[in-house]
Amino acid sequence: MSGALKDPDLISVQEVRSKVEQAYAAWQKYRSFSQEKVDAIVEQVAAAARANARRLAELAVEETRYGNAKDKLAKNLLCSDVLPRAMRGLKTVGVLREDSEKKVVEIGVPMGVVAAILPTTNPTSTAIYRL
């Protein structure tokens, strides 16, 4: 028997491990990014999601057999347009707020890799929303 994996479950586990390692390595870089860099990334992801919103809606319906592409398109656009627009100017890195009276300083820092399970009913809009 060769060294290649043949068991689909083992292959899936190995794929997850590889993706987690890649995500952790990306986070190591991301955690030092400035507010401007984080904002640019959010804008780029949102732009890519808007550009592909229709195709992602169609693929979601095709794969899950739930809903219709028109409604999924609307949700994809909501998550990739309205939400990022509402976030513009929102400080998420560094000192976010200081309350000298209460002696409290809120500091925004990346917390690490976040894994999410996507529902079959709205897989693309949920992923986009998690920008």
Image (spheres, rainbow, N blue to C red):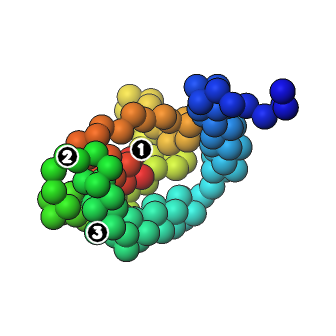
Q: Is residue 128 left or right of residue 20?
A: left
Q: Residue at x 68, y 38 (%)?
A: 18
Mark 1, Cα crowd under 10 Å, few <14 / some 14-19 / many 20+, is few
Q: Position of residue 31 (x, y in %)?
A: 63, 46
The residue identified by callout 1 is 97
Q: Name the kind of residue labelled 1 in the image.
A: Arg
In the picture, measured across the screen, residue 110 lies left or right of residue 1, that is left
Percent position of residue 49, x then y:
38, 65
Q: Quadrant of residue 128?
A: bottom left
Question: Please, is residue 1 above or below residue 112 in the view?
Answer: above
Please give the residue where the numbered disc 3 appears in the rendered image: 54
Q: Earlier in the sequence, mark 3 or mark 1?
A: 3
Q: Which residue is mark 2?
A: 66
Tell me whether the residue at label 2 lies in contact with that at label 1, contact meaning CB atoms closer than 8 angstroms: no
Q: Position of residue 77 (x, y in %)?
A: 25, 65
> Is residue 58 in view from this perspective?
yes
- Name the mark on residue 43: none
**Mark 2 or mark 1, which has the lower sequence index?**
2
Q: How many marks?
A: 3
Real-space CA distance between mark 2 and mark 1, rounded to the nearest whole angstrom: 43 Å
Secondary structure under tag 2 reads: loop
* SS class, disc 1: strand
Q: Dot 2: within a 10 Å radius of its alpha carbon, few (fewer than 14), some, or many (20 or more) residues?
A: few
Helix, strand or loop under label 3:
helix
User: Up-down: is 4 above or below 42?
Assistant: above
Mark closest to the chain's N terminus, 2 or 3 = 3
The residue at the point 39 percent across, 34 percent down is: 117
Query: At x 36% / y 39%, what residue is drawn?
Result: 118
Identified at 43% across, 41% down, the residue is 98
